Amino acid sequence: MTGALEQFLRRMHAERTKKTLAGIGPGGWDSKALANAQGQATATSAGKVKTIYRLYTEDVNRNRTIATVKRYFDGATLLYGIGLDARTQFADENAVVIEIVSSKTDALQRVLDLAGDLRENNAQISILITRHDVHTFEVTETSPTQGTL
């Protein structure tokens, strides 16, 4: 974390109140100052990049899908919704997006292996995978300054 961002977060954490602000969370955060501090940190934190992988598939066998994800990754988020596909004249189907955040070098290979297993297990024609590099920041129980950016 850059010095400017860390200093800002320490000051804001010390000054925060008990009220919650929409989109910001608990405390009296100065959103403009936070955005400026984050912008400065992003430019200097190239070594803190993680990758988000998203796998899009039909929600066919939820328990088996969860067990398969657990075989490859320690953590993931499964988001459930409705999928529409032009190949089926936009008929709706139950869908799941599996989101994995990782900085490990072998993550892409594990994502591809996971997608292959899910495609086979769920009898899918294909599974869409997207990949995005992101800067991450975590707010912990003790203080927002415990995270990384």
Image (cartoon, grey):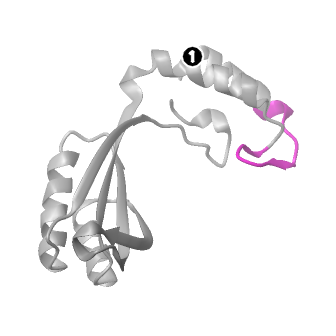
Residue 6 seen in the figure: no
Residue 8 seen in the figure: yes
Chain part drawn in magenta: 13-26
Which secondary structure, mark 1? helix
Residue at horizontal 29 percent and vertical 44 percent from the top = 131
The reply, left or right, for residue 45 in relation to residue 125 is right
Q: Nearer the viewer, residue 35 or 125?
A: 125
| Mark 1 closeness class: few <14, some 14–19, many ≥20 residues within 10 Å | some
Q: Position of residue 49 (x, y in %)?
A: 38, 31
Up/down of 96 relative to 7, above or below:
below
Residue at horizontal 64 percent and vertical 21 percent from the top = 37
Q: Is 18 covered by the magenta stretch? A: yes
Up/down of 15 relative to 99, above or below:
above
The reply, left or right, for residue 35 in relation to residue 86 is right
Residue at horizontal 30 percent and vertical 63 percent from the top = 56
Give the residue type at disc 1.
Gln
Residue 104, quarter of picture: top left
Q: Nearer the viewer, residue 128 or 142?
A: 128
Q: Position of residue 44 (x, y in %)?
A: 47, 15
- Please, which residue is most extreme toward the front here? 89
Query: In the rendered image, which residue does mark 1 sit on?
Result: 40
The reply, left or right, for residue 15 in relation to residue 86 is right
Q: Nearer the viewer, residue 21 or 102?
A: 21
